[in-house]
């Protein structure tokens, strides 16, 4: 069975040629530059991928959770507050689309206000409105109809479905996800540029060796293959190290179970942990095409 030309080229590249590999300096500036560029870009790529995936997950969670919750705020004179809160709860029990409704306790309100007003907040001395947490079914609530009923039966109630500030949060998370993927493209481009620079420098430094090889009959494709193989190997090794360090760093970030807000749980989940393993492969492919292009162009200029 005949392999496709691309796979044949890759197989030949991996097999290598010991004599041709001697053309490329095994150490020095170009080797260090290739290893460092591939490692650093792979490290950053892991974080960019983790950011994109986790912010997408965060946007979906915010959209789902906030879309199914709402708050009923009741502002009324102290002597009417309890009666209106009870009337609102009875009204919500007969409202289509309401899965549950419960009044937020004074202790819960104090816990919500403590970060802003301090722990010794005298709620009894402040005109704090009554709050009712409303959870919707998947079918949702007819918000306009509910507001009309509240206006007639509980005049001090204001129904807030969080749409006013939910949409900007979800939009921000989605844009952050897009910036993460854009960062991956930029990282790939920078890595390709750095490897192209290193390959061009190595070719220029070995101009006399290349001239000698040509005199004894070596073709440009033979010489270019040696550089492509060596630089692809370096990029693969550097990217593997960088991706491993990046994955370890992401794994050490606070988990979603840790108290502390929305910046926790920024990482991979499930099969997403396999994504960093693709980064060295992508880096090797970028190095292959970047080095091949640079080698053929430089060899033409040296003719």
Image (cartoon, helix red, strand yellow):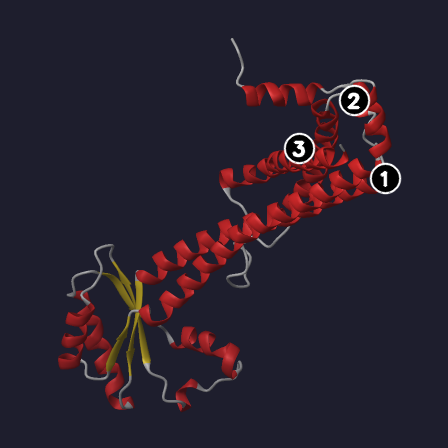
Determine the secondary structure under disc 1. Answer: loop
Q: Earlier in the sequence, mark 3 or mark 1?
A: 1
Determine the secondary structure under disc 2. Answer: helix
Q: Which numbered disc covers residue 28?
A: 1
Residue 122 rendering spot, x and y as whole percentages: 46, 87
Residue 255 rendering spot, x and y as whole percentages: 56, 52
Q: Is residue 180 left or right of residue 136?
A: right
**Residue depicted at x 36% and y 89%:** 127
**Residue depicted at x 67% and y 23%:** 13
Residue 35 seen: no
Determine the secondary structure under disc 3. Answer: helix
The quadrant in which residue 26 appears is: top right
Residue 51 rendering spot, x and y as whole percentages: 54, 53
- The residue carrying pointer 2 sits among few (fewer than 14), some (14 to 19) or many (20 or more) residues within 10 Å by Cα, namely some
Assess whether mark 1 and mark 3 are in contact (beta carbons under 8 angstroms): no
The quadrant in which residue 33 appears is: top right
**Which of 241 and 158 lies nearest the eye of the viewer?**
241
Judging by the rendered image, the residue that carries numbered circle 2 is: 20
Q: Is residue 201 above or below residue 216?
A: below
Q: Is residue 223 left or right of residue 259?
A: right
Residue 253 rendering spot, x and y as whole percentages: 61, 53
**Which of 157 and 19 lies nearest the eye of the viewer?**
19
Q: Earlier in the sequence, mark 1 or mark 2?
A: 2
**Residue depicted at x 53% and y 80%:** 119
- The residue carrying pointer 1 sits among few (fewer than 14), some (14 to 19) or many (20 or more) residues within 10 Å by Cα, namely few
Q: Viewer-nearest of labels 3 and 1? A: 3
Q: Earlier in the sequence, mark 3 or mark 2?
A: 2
Total of numbered circles in the picture? Answer: 3
**Which of 40 and 254 lies nearest the eye of the viewer?**
40
Judging by the rendered image, the residue that carries numbered circle 3 is: 292
Q: Is residue 47 left or right of residue 81?
A: right
**Residue depicted at x 22% and y 76%:** 86
């Amino acid at each position: 069975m005949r392999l496709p030309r691309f796979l044949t080229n890759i197989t030949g590249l991996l097999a290598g040629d010991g004599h041709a590999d001697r053309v490329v300096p095994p150490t020095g500036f170009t080797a260090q530059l290739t290893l460092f560029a591939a490692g650093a870009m792979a490290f950053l790529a892991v974080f960019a991928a983790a950011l994109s995936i986790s912010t997408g997950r965060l946007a979906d969670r915010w959209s789902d959770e906030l879309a199914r919750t709402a708050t009923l705020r009741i502002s009324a004179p102290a002597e009417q507050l309890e009666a209106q809160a009870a009337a609102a709860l009875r009204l919500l029990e007969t409202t289509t689309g309401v899965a549950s409704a419960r009044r937020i306790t004074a202790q819960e309100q104090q816990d919500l206000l403590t970060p802003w007003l301090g722990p010794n907040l005298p709620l009894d001395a402040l005109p704090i409105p009554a709050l009712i947490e409303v959870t919707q079914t998947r079918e949702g609530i007819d918000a306009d109809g509910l507001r009309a009923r509240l206006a007639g039966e509980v005049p001090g109630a204001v129904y807030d479905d969080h749409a006013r500030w939910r949409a900007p949060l979800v939009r921000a998370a989605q844009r952050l996800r897009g910036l993460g993927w854009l960062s991956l493209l930029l990282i790939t481009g920078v890595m390709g540029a750095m490897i192209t620079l290193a390959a061009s420098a190595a070719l220029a430094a070995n101009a006399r060796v290349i001239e000698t090889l040509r005199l004894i009959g070596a073709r440009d494709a033979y010489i270019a293959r040696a550089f492509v193989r060596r630089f692809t190997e370096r990029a693969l090794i550097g990217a593997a190290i960088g991706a491993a360090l990046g994955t370890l760093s992401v794994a050490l970030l606070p988990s979603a179970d840790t108290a502390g807000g929305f910046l926790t749980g920024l990482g991979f989940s499930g099969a997403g942990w396999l994504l960093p393993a693709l980064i060295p492969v992508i880096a090797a492919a970028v190095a292959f095409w970047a080095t091949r292009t640079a080698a053929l162009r430089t060899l033409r200029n040296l003719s």
